[in-house]
Image: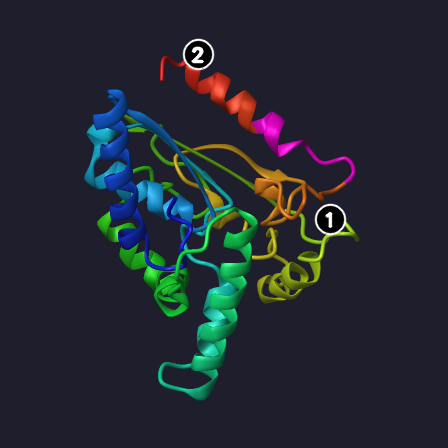
Amino acid sequence: MCRRATSPRVRGEQLIRYLDQLRATYGHAKFNLIGHSHGGPTVRYVASVRPALVASMTSIGAPHTGSKVADGLRAAAPPGSILEATLAGFVNALSLFIELLSGDGDPQDALGALASLNSAGAATFNARHPQGKPTTACGQGAAVVNNVRYYSMGGTSVLTNILDISDPMLGAGSLFFGWEQNDGLVGQCSSHWGVVLRDNYGWNHLDEVNQILGFRGLFSSSPASVYRAHANRLKNAGL
């Protein structure tokens, strides 16, 4: 659910409808939401506007303060330009490819996503939904807001496996960050929200969710093991 390239609000409203459906069908009272990349702001939106639905929110490799890749692409392809149309087509195709790998195939809205993933769009979103926002530029935020627990984690490796066809793309993305640690699309500090569990796993942006085909660094942590440990953390916290 909610893997389309579009705004966090649109994705969040879609997720709320799905959660309401699950609650009506199975009687669940609250949900532990985990969002990767653009899914981070999406689950934050749900926690902000419908906190009674959410027990915890965990983001993984999410561009909470925007992505320098998005900033660079927007600067290179200003609104209304031919480059903007070309960029939109490329990002839509890439997003659809990733969705098909995930067993989905929703239509894409690259320009809507780009507007919310750049620094300006992220700042606007954060002003409207500040729950869990770090108190310093690269620090941590409140652990609990409106009875919702906030967690985040991320990676800081880029070229992790020679067999992974996505590594060159992420390597190109990392050039936008200069010396800043990043996962190829998201800067280390931008991934911070709420309690930062860890921000330097040996993962790139797709390794964080075991894509593509589970290729990752030889000595990096297993994402499946990390998420099982987090599930146990939530269980032990009574969530």
Judged from the image, the secondary structure of the residue bearing numbered disc 2 is helix
Q: Residue at x 36, y 18 (%)?
A: 239
Q: Quadrant of residue 117?
A: bottom left
Mark 1 in CB contact with mark 2 (< 8 angstroms): no
Please tell me how many numbered marks the rendered image carries. 2
Q: Which residues are magenta?
A: 218-226
Q: Position of residue 52 (x, y in %)?
A: 20, 28
Residue for badge 1? 160
Q: Amino acid at mark 2?
A: Asn
Mark 1 residue type = Thr
Residue at the spot of label 2:
236
Can residue 160 be seen here? The reply is yes
- The spot of residue 66 in percent (x, y) is 42, 57
* Most foreground residue, 34 or 118: 34
Front-lying residue, 10 or 154:
10
Q: Earlier in the sequence, mark 1 or mark 2?
A: 1
* Left or right of residue 39, residue 131 in this image: left
Local crowd size for mark 1, using a 10 Å CA cut-off: few (<14), some (14–19), many (≥20): many
| In magenta segment, residue 222 | yes
